[in-house]
Amino acid sequence: MKYDFTSIMDRSGKDAIAVDGLGAIPGFTPGAPKEGFDAIPMWVADMNFPTVPTIPEAIIERAKHPAYGYFQPTDAYYDAIIRWHETRNKVTGLTKDCIGYENGVLGGVISALTAFAAPGDAVLLHSPTYIGFTMSIGNNGFKIVHSPLVKDENGVWRMDYEDMDMKLKMENIHVAVFCSPHNPCGRVWERWEIEKAMEVYQANDCLVISDEIWSDIILAGHKHIPTQMVSEDARNRTIGVYAPSKTFNLAGLVGSYHIIYNKYLRDRIRAKGSKPHYNDMNVLSMHALIGAYKPEGYEWVDELCEVITGNVDYACDYIREHFEGVEVSKPEGTYMLFLDCTKWCEAHDRTIGELQQAGWDVGVAWQDGRMFHGPCSIRLNLALPLSRVKEAFDRMDKYVFNGGFAVEEGYQKRLNAGDTMADFTFDTPFEQGRSLRETAGRAKKTALLFLRYYGCTLCQVDIHRLAENYDKITAGGGQLLVVLQSEPEIISGQIEKDMLPFDMICDPKQTLYRRFGVRGAADMSAMIDGRAYTKITEAAAAGYQHGKYEGNELQLPAAFVLDGDCKVEYAHYGKTLSDIPDADMFAKLLAK
């Protein structure tokens, strides 16, 4: 290749939120990596490639002149934009009058919205939704109405035209924001799709603001169709917003523009944008655009798209082959992946927040997809040298999806009915070295209940109830074992050998909890429900005293019923401290 897409740039200390911002804004920026890992920036949508050399050359050449006073955009600026759109997107009829400066694409969106809608009015957007839309539109007092994209039988995101039409009518919506290509899903809409969407908007007298900032980053086999080019009505109904910032990594310079063919729309939006006196161009930003849209820029973008296509192919193939339970619809444009981790999280009893943190810990600085309305999703930036993409996926494999975090501290996948519980040797407060298989073979069925530790007052209530109802529980010929995170001597120092009708397995190192996937809660509030509060009250009334704290204070319960060969007939992982079978349920399960 003619241009450099392989060098690894050190952006630290160079005004890059992608690396310097890690951990700076909890809840928005990824966390900083743990010691021993460098950060691989894969979140905010800017690139880790050096831009085309004609841009810094143009900026430096202009900066050599030591005066930076008031100015007007030059003909060279407008000519560069017109030539770019004519050449790359086959646009016709674009003139200087149709082009206007915007201080960022989101600024243009808000100027258009406020020109044709009032705070409190509803605005239609597709979801998943770019967080910038959510923040800027919400901050200006508009009501966001989502029309969810849906995946077809091939996993391709599609617009739901009936849903769009219904919501436009029900909410009396007359302004919509359209994202083309779509962020974060990466769809490059086909002409027929845009035509059909515009028919829906036309039928509902709805103005369209089309964010096309990603329109230059199109992957192999796909083609961007400007929304305004699909019909004469679309040309007159649509405000198009563009910028070289996404294409050439110029977000820090600030400089976008709108294309509006309809003079009425254009006059209203320009009037609105001019009112706060903020919407003025930076002279170096103008020269950056001119430098970007030179012939070298055309070549550079073509090579960029080739590199991104290769990165996307590598990433999607790797996910399919190595990350079971992670789903991704292969993007057709942009350099972002939108991972659906629902099945993986369910299989591993992990939250999406925990999964994201595991990536951040090892330097994979990916982005929380929930802010894009993906409930169990991660957004992943692939605009890096392929070597860094490979390093990131290697870390995901070793430390996150298939090792380390996936089996953190030895945690295994949850057991299900039909599985066989692996044999293990255990100690009770009064015996050592007993075998599960040997013990289970003594009865038709064995119930195994995992609780916290003996000093826990809620556990004492549970143990007391089980003892009181033991004859009922075992009437069908079964037996009960209780697993606790307690040291044997802690229990033996408080009770005598035959005080309880069942044995308690002591697992102070939580080996069995990890082996059988019995995890803890995310925090204390997640493990306490109404029944738990009731049980706490009962414990206090009965005079139970809290003993020594042991093991994981956030430990959740689990219950299993095994046959004589340790085959699992019933498996239940509690979601709160009180979420365990009662005596009647145990009796029923053991009597089957």
Image: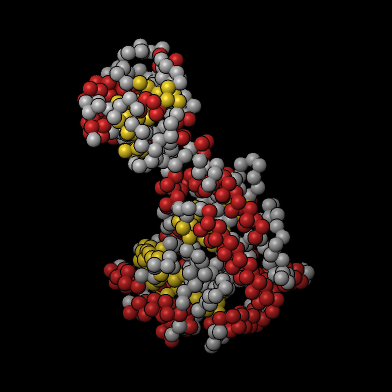
User: In front here: 489 or 45?
Assistant: 489
User: In front here: 209 or 113?
Assistant: 209
The answer to whether 259 appears left or right of 343 in the picture is right
Residue 519 visible from this viewpoint:
no
User: In front here: 522 or 339?
Assistant: 339
Q: Residue furthest bottom?
A: 93
What kind of colouring is applied to the model shown? secondary structure
Look at 55% across and 75% down and name the residue there. Answer: 221
| x and y percentages locating residue 193 in the rendered image | 42, 77
- Total of numbered circles in the picture? 0
| x and y percentages locating residue 284 in the rendered image | 68, 69
Residue 28 visible from this viewpoint:
yes
| x and y percentages locating residue 245 in the rendered image | 60, 68
Rendered-image quadrant of the C terminus: top left
Rendered-image quadrant of the N terminus: bottom right
- Please tell me in which quadrant of the rendered image residue 589 appears: top left
Look at 32% across and 69% down and name the residue there. Answer: 163
The answer to whether 219 appears left or right of 537 in the picture is right
Q: Is residue 19 above or below residue 92?
A: above
- Please tell me in which quadrant of the rendered image residue 257 appears: bottom right
- Please tell me in which quadrant of the rendered image residue 499 appears: top left
Q: Is residue 364 above or below residue 127?
A: above
| x and y percentages locating residue 533 in the rendered image | 30, 30
Look at 33% across and 79% down and name the residue there. Answer: 203
